[in-house]
Amino acid sequence: MLESFQNNHNAPVEIESVYGQNFSSLPTFGQPVSTKVPATCGELAQGYLGGKDFLINSPISLHAEVSLQLNRIGSICIFSHGNFSKMSSAVSETLRQLNNSHLGAEIQVNGSIPRGKGLASSTAEVAAAIISARTSLGYRSSPKRISEVVTKFDSTDGTYFPGISMLNQVTGEYYQAIGTPPPLAFIICDTGGQIESHEFDRAKARRHASSHPNCLREAIKLIKDGVRLHEPRLIADGATISAKINQGILYKQQFTDLLKLAKDAGALGVNCAHTGTILGVMYDPRHDIQDKLIQRIEAEFGEDFIIGCHQLVSGGVI
């Protein structure tokens, strides 16, 4: 399945700086540059086929916004609460690659993406910082170039690629552009706790996925057909298959009951964060069922179980 994607990379070609290394002439130098990159509701599918890791991402209408201002001090200062060591390292690496390692940056992270849940907060924040740094130096940023830096420090959901994308989350290798999504929305539910990507047992995940190749291929086909035919039900069917497989890797106690409740109430299925704690109840937003779904979910699992409602969107950079 994955072998057929190797010659369909579709990523924009890198365009180098229009200013060369004369950064003092840049209109953006010394000025804050803000970039937004989407979060995700877990993934539509994730697994291991043909000796390669893969995921199909699920960008949502929730963004990380990073404002970055270069300076000549030479240190990276992040004025936001939380651990942003990956971001600091990624910005330092970006400046080094562009022969400006003597520069520093002041960074402000905005947005409210919960961390350690499987919403791709790290992908969105780190990618946005890399793009802001490159933009400040007059460089455009191809998704391929972003992936090369992001995956030096973490896995990636690749939400900076346009549309819905299939990629290798570990290496950043780009497999295929799936397309522009039809109307599909998620009620995002948190099963509790936090999972850091470096704590995830990838060897176990690969072994388990390798025992379900036909189901994974069916999930991929359904998702691709759903995007191509603009049919959200097919996407949800494929995502639910992948979530069921993931129960053997990262078990979520509420999954089975939530899926039954969701289907009974008119939802299309349930996806998951394959390396996180969240579940996404998928429904067609053109149908007026969101309030009913929320009421039933809260009645069954408690008001704190739902952490947001967001639509599936095309990936890309703002």
Image: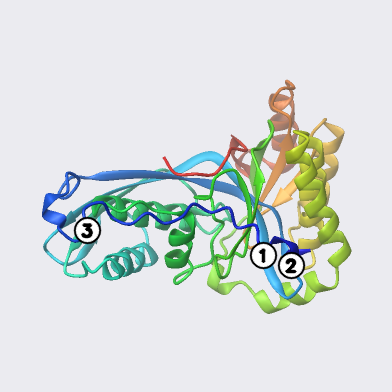
Q: Residues within 10 Å of mark 3 (few under 14, many from 20)?
A: few
Label 3 residue SS: loop
Query: Which quadrant holds residue 205?
Result: bottom right
Q: Which residue is mark 3?
A: 20
Q: Which residue is mark 2?
A: 3
Give the residue type that dot 2 points to.
Glu
> CB of mark 1 within 8 Å of CB of mark 3?
no
Q: CA distance from mark 1 to mark 3?
A: 32 Å
Give the residue type that dot 1 points to.
Gln
> CB of mark 1 within 8 Å of CB of mark 2?
yes
Q: Quick one: label 3 or label 2, which is nearer the N terminus?
A: 2
Label 1 residue SS: loop
Q: CA distance from mark 3 to mark 2?
A: 38 Å
Give the residue type that dot 3 points to.
Gly
On the rendered image, what quadrant is the C terminus found in? top left
Q: Residues within 10 Å of mark 1 (few under 14, many from 20)?
A: few
Q: Which residue is mark 1?
A: 6
